[in-house]
Each structure stands twice: as structure tokens, then as C-alpha cells.
Image (cartoon, helix red, strand yellow):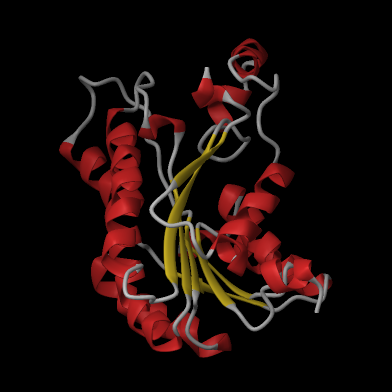
């Protein structure tokens, strides 16, 4: 076995990716499959066609994939989701919490329902879903949890108070998960990726205005916004043995935006 395979190959691993029907979640799921993991995509029932397409995309390249439909904000259904996800390839030992929502409203228009939905999907679900998977990870002596943070984990953007609060929470939750689960040589790590601006369903409205999106690119050091291929290296790194001594960290994949 080469050093590269030893560090980065995911053969025999099983990944559960929420938000796996589109955007960052789908790109990360495809990447994990390309490195050898069997991948279970999870998303809302309304996304079933996209889930089927995502699975077919993986299978066309010789990978293993399946899907489950779920609403991660429904805490009562999470145990059933984990049970169903585990029925395909075994219990997931990689979890990517990529499901997310950003309901853009000015501070005076934010309702209690909007606030609660955003927190439930972006912050509450990652903890409770991970907690359901932890016993099997502990038994196997290996596990990788990857949360999705945001530039708004560190700074404020207009019309995004609930989203910013949830993503600030994700950054701290990642530390708390590491503190709870990475000790005693457990083999479990918990880290987060903080993406810059990538073209996804959440950022779609911004990409409709070329002036806005070009201005965002100028805010980076590299000089462009993110492309889905930019996710591949960090995804494999955090899901593989190569990152076994890294936990509790949020790594910003943002072209240097957060460094300016």
C-alpha cells in the first residue's frame, strides 16, 4: 500500500451525508465515494429525484451509494433515519452534517418560526444525529464527524441573524463534540469546514447579480469564489486517517476571505 492510500483511502468506510441531494453536501458525498467510501445521501422527501440522481452519479463511476429521505429538524425521526441509513452498508463511521437553511430576512421580519427552523436544521440536528452514531464509532474505535460552518461563524452578514447565530454555534459545537468524543484514544475526530462563497441553493440569489458576486470574489485573497472541486481535498483529508490528530477545528475554505 502506498503512503497516499494509507493516509487518504476510505475503502471499507461508510459515510452518511445530510443535505446530500445538492450543493456542498452532494459534492462532498461524491468525493467520499471517489475515495472508496460507501455513501448514504440524506435529504428531504421533496428532494427524492435529486437523491436518486446523486446515487446514480456515484454508481456510474463504480462507487457504492444509497439514499434516505428525512427531515433532520424532526428529532423524533432521527433514530429511524440512522437505522435505515445503517441498513445499506453498515453503521456510518463518517458523518457529514451538510443540511442547512438560510431564510434571508431583515432583523425586524424574523419570526419565532423562522428562528426555530434555522437553529433546528443548522445546529440542533448535527448534535443529535452525531450522538446517535457515536456508540458504534466508539465500538469500532474510529469515526469522523464533519460539520459545515460558514463565514458567518465569525462575522455578521445582512439579513441573516438566525443563520449567523446557528453557524456561530456550529463552530463552538464542533469544539464541544471534540471535547466529548475525541478523548481516551477513541479514534473519533470532530471538525468543521467553513466554506466561502460557493454556488449552491443557499447562495443562488447572490449569483443572480454579477456585480455582487464579482465583489465577493474581490474580497478573497485568491481572487475568485469557490468551485465545487475546491471541496475535494479538504473533504477527503478530514474524513481520512490523514487527519487523525486534528479535532475541534474549523478550517475555512474561503480563498483567504477570513484572513483579510
Q: Where is residue 38 in the image (x, y as percent from the top left)?
A: 64, 78
Taking the spot 31% from the left edge, 79% from the top edge, the residue there is 79
How many labels sit on residues? Answer: 0
Q: Which of 2 and 189 is in front in this view?
A: 2
Question: Picture quarter containing residue 20?
Answer: bottom right
Q: Height in image: 149 above or below 17?
A: above
Taking the spot 58% from the left edge, 87% from the top edge, the residue there is 89
Q: Nearer the viewer, residue 155 or 9?
A: 9
Q: Where is residue 51 in the image (x, y as percent from the top left)?
A: 61, 65
Q: In this view, does 107 lie to the left or right of 246?
A: left
Q: Residue furthest left?
A: 112
Question: Picture quarter containing residue 195?
Answer: top right
Q: Height in image: 31 above or below 158?
A: below
Q: Position of residue 11 (x, y in %)?
A: 69, 79
Taking the spot 16% from the left edge, 38% from the top edge, the residue there is 112
Taking the spot 44% from the left edge, 44% from the top edge, the residue there is 250
Q: Nearer the viewer, residue 182 or 239?
A: 182
Q: Name the image quarter holding the N terminus.
A: bottom right
Q: Is residue 104 left or right of residue 28?
A: left
Q: Residue 73: in sight, yes or no? A: no
Q: Position of residue 248 (x, y in %)?
A: 38, 53
Q: Residue 228: in sight, yes or no? A: yes
Amino acid at each position: 500500500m502506498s503512503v497516499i492510500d494509507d493516509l487518504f483511502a476510505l475503502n471499507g468506510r461508510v459515510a452518511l451525508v445530510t443535505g446530500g441531494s445538492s450543493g456542498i453536501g452532494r459534492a462532498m458525498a461524491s468525493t467520499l465515494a471517489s475515495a472508496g467510501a460507501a455513501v448514504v445521501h440524506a435529504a428531504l422527501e421533496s428532494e427524492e429525484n435529486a437523491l436518486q440522481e446523486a446515487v446514480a452519479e456515484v454508481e456510474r463511476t463504480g462507487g457504492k451509494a444509497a439514499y434516505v429521505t428525512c427531515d433532520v429538524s424532526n428529532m423524533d425521526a432521527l433514530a429511524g433515519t440512522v437505522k435505515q441509513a445503517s441498513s445499506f452498508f453498515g453503521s456510518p463511521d463518517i458523518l457529514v452534517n451538510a443540511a442547512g437553511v438560510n431564510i434571508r430576512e431583515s432583523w425586524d421580519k424574523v419570526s419565532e418560526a423562522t428562528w426555530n427552523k434555522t437553529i433546528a436544521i443548522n445546529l440542533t440536528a448535527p448534535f443529535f444525529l452525531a450522538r446517535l452514531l457515536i456508540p458504534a464509532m466508539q465500538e469500532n474505535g474510529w469515526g469522523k464527524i464533519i460539520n459545515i460552518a460558514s463565514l458567518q461563524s465569525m462575522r455578521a452578514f445582512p439579513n441573516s441573524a438566525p443563520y449567523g447565530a446557528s453557524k456561530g454555534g456550529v463552530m463552538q459545537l464542533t469544539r464541544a463534540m471534540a471535547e466529548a468524543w475525541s478523548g481516551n484514544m477513541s479514534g473519533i475526530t470532530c471538525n468543521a469546514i467553513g466554506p466561502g462563497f460557493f454556488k449552491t441553493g443557499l447562495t443562488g440569489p447572490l449569483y443572480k447579480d454579477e456585480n455582487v458576486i464579482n465583489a465577493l470574489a474581490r474580497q478573497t485573497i485568491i481572487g475568485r469564489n469557490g468551485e465545487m472541486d475546491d471541496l475535494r481535498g479538504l473533504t477527503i483529508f478530514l474524513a481520512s486517517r490523514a487527519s487523525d490528530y486534528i479535532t475541534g477545528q474549523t478550517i475555512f475554505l474561503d480563498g483567504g476571505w477570513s484572513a483579510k
